[in-house]
């Protein structure tokens, strides 16, 4: 069933077009990766789905209801978002994660059983039990990324938007976050849209890929088919070779040297 | 959480002690019993009440601004909102506008408009260049403050001597009142502001984590910000119109409260009210005792305390979050 449908979405800021008639569908349980160069409009697209960046034209529907019919609170019960630049949070980790329950609360709501169970399962899934009582500012990049994801999970939304969740992490912590996203998608049926520069991760783990170039759709299709379509070099203006992984026999992309 | 509750009760207790003790300070025993009673009821008590209301109101507005702009230096005073209110009030006096709406004076109305227009203006300048910039916000606020101060000086210069003197006294911030007439038009605005801010505690908690984060958790940031701009302008306008701009309370009190209570606005709002109210009572008591029988305007005392505090904040603060 289609959860999220975007058709002909365009965004301009100061008459500068950032996104130009983008269309795609995300069905329940899907995992879509968005690829593209820096400045291609990936983050803008993600932010527009969270209502952070206003849309100039086009149609977004959630469960066939128009996007504009949702209040910000209703939207936050369906969609959660982990942004790219983590802001400095002056809070204890557990307090920060509790804020994720906001869309389920009215002004004087008391912390209920369902709140606690959402909190507990978010903490267990992201495995952050050990630093619940620490201050956010003292966490390492990988730890804070998991805390951010936990806070978003606390919202119990069906769709999780992730903006380059692994770009500042070392290979070990990248692997950890990738495994977490996989688990959320497969075991917990959370629909995921992820912006990433990690090509091979996108090809191996996601189901669909949307490749953006200068605000336009360059390619959109099943992840397996990306390497068969010779668009990678064009997408990044950079030479790539594809080869077979010696252990898994899967096709992988390798960035080649720029020859001058 | 337990620390927060304990510190809040401590603040509550100290407030009670201050409220009970300060009105008796400086009461002379040589007066006839009737006179003493009259001083206590008609001068001391209303003044105590006024100081508490004004201190609480200023602190709440400071708390809101610090939360909205994620920085302890962002307050109604540093952002020029108080200057805007002062200019509005000075203009209404200068042009001799005098009417009242439901018992609220034209001076209050002008001060409110001055505050609201200023914060709207300063905020819109700070978002001109691709999203919000804290630097631009603070710099615009400072620039606007100076600009408005000059305009007020001009008004002062154009006024005749007695009016100019009154204006100067008022600009220094003053709580010296007789009777309750000043308090009644002020109280509803401060109460309204405190109630609205308390109601929006959850939203303020989220706003401290940044606009983008707040939006993604479901806060309608634009709407909440408009409401907060409106009520804080009401509060600042009403306070400035009746007591003049009393500086730095709105910066010091909420910041100290954050250190004591943490970041949860459900506790911070009552804590800032109590702390702010009793802090201004203490400052006012100092102001009337230090060179008794003469008095120093209370704004002088708060600014003398606030200046060094501001510097301490600047030195202590890590790089401001932008």
Image (cartoon, coloured by chain):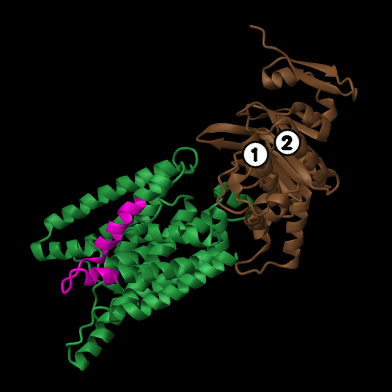
Chain colours: A brown, B green
Q: Residue, x 17% and y 88% (percent of image)?
A: B31
Question: Toward the viewer: A258 or B104?
Answer: A258
Residue farthest to the front, as pictured? B29
Highlighted magenta segment, given as a residue range? B284-310
| Label drawn at residue B5 | none
Q: Residue, x 78% and y 52% (percent of image)?
A: A124
Mark 1, residue position: A141
The alpha-carbon separation of the residues under discs 1 and 2 comes to 9 Å
Mark 2, residue position: A173
Q: Residue B213: x, y in percent?
A: 60, 49
Q: Crowding near pointer 1: few (<14 within 10 Å), some, many (20+)?
A: some
Q: Are marks 1 and 2 on the same chain?
A: yes
In the rendered image, residue B307 lying in the magenta stretch gets the answer: yes
Q: Are marks 1 and 2 in contact (CB under 8 Å)?
A: yes
Q: Residue, x 46% and y 41% (percent of image)?
A: B319
Q: Say what secondary structure mark 2 lies in.
A: helix
């Amino acid at each position: 069933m289609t959860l999220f449908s975007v058709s002909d979405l365009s965004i301009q800021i100061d008459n500068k077009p950032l996104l130009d008639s983008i269309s795609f569908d995300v069905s329940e349980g899907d995992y879509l990766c968005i690829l593209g160069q820096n400045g291609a409009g990936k983050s803008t697209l993600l932010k527009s789905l969270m209502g952070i960046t206003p849309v100039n034209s086009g149609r977004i529907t959630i469960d066939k209801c128009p996007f504009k019919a949702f209040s910000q609170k209703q939207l936050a019960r369906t969609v959660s978002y982990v942004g790219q630049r983590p802001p400095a949070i002056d809070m204890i980790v557990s307090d920060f994660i509790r804020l994720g329950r906001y869309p389920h609360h009215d002004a004087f709501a008391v912390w209920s059983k369902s709140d606690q169970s959402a909190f507990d399962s978010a903490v267990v899934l992201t495995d952050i039990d050990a630093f619940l009582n620490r201050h956010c500012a003292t966490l390492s990049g990988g730890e804070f990324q998991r805390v951010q994801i936990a806070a978003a999970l606390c919202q119990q939304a069906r769709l999780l938007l992730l903006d380059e969740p692994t770009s500042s992490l070392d290979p070990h912590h990248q692997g950890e976050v990738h495994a977490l996203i996989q688990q959320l998608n497969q075991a917990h049926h959370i629909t995921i849209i992820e912006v990433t520069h990690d090509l091979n991760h996108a090809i191996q783990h996601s189901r669909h890929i949307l490749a953006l170039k200068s605000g336009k759709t360059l390619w959109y299709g099943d992840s397996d088919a990306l390497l068969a379509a010779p668009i990678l070099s064009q997408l990044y203006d950079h030479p790539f070779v594809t080869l077979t992984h010696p252990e898994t026999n899967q096709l992988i992309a390798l960035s080649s040297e720029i020859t001058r | 959480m337990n620390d927060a509750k304990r510190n809040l009760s401590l603040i509550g207790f100290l407030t009670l002690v201050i409220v009970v003790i300060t009105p008796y300070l400086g009461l002379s025993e040589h007066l006839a019993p009737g006179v003493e009673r009259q001083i206590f009821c008609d001068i001391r008590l209303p003044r105590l009440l006024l100081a508490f209301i004004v201190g609480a109101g200023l602190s709440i507005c400071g708390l809101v601004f610090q939360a909205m702009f994620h920085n302890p230096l962002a307050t109604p005073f540093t952002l020029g909102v108080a200057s805007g209110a002062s200019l509005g009030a000075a203009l209404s006096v200068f042009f001799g506008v005098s009417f009242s709406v439901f018992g609220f004076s034209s001076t209050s109305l002008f001060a409110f408009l001055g505050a609201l227009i200023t914060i709207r203006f300063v905020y819109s300048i700070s978002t001109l260049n691709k999203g919000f910039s804290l630097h631009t916000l603070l710099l615009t606020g400072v620039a606007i403050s100076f600009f408005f101060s000059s305009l007020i000086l001009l008004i002062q210069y154009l006024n005749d001597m007695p009016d100019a003197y009154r204006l100067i006294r008022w600009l220094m911030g003053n709580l010296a009142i007789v009777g309750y007439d000043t308090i009644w038009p002020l109280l509803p605005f401060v109460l309204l502001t405190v109630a609205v801010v308390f109601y929006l505690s959850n939203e303020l908690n989220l706003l401290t984590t940044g606009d983008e984060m707040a939006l993604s958790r479901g806060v309608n940031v634009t709407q909440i910000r408009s409401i907060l701009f409106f009520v804080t302008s009401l509060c600042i306008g009403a306070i400035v119109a009746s007591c003049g701009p009393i500086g730095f309370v709105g910066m010091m009190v909420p910041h100290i409260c954050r250190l004591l209570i943490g970041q949860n606005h459900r506790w911070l709002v009552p804590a800032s009210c109590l702390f702010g109210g009793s802090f201004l009572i203490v400052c006012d008591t100092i102001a009337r005792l230090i060179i008794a029988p003469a008095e120093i305007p209370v704004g002088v005392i708060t600014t003398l305390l606030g200046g060094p505090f501001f510097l301490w904040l600047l030195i202590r603060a890590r790089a401001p979050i932008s």
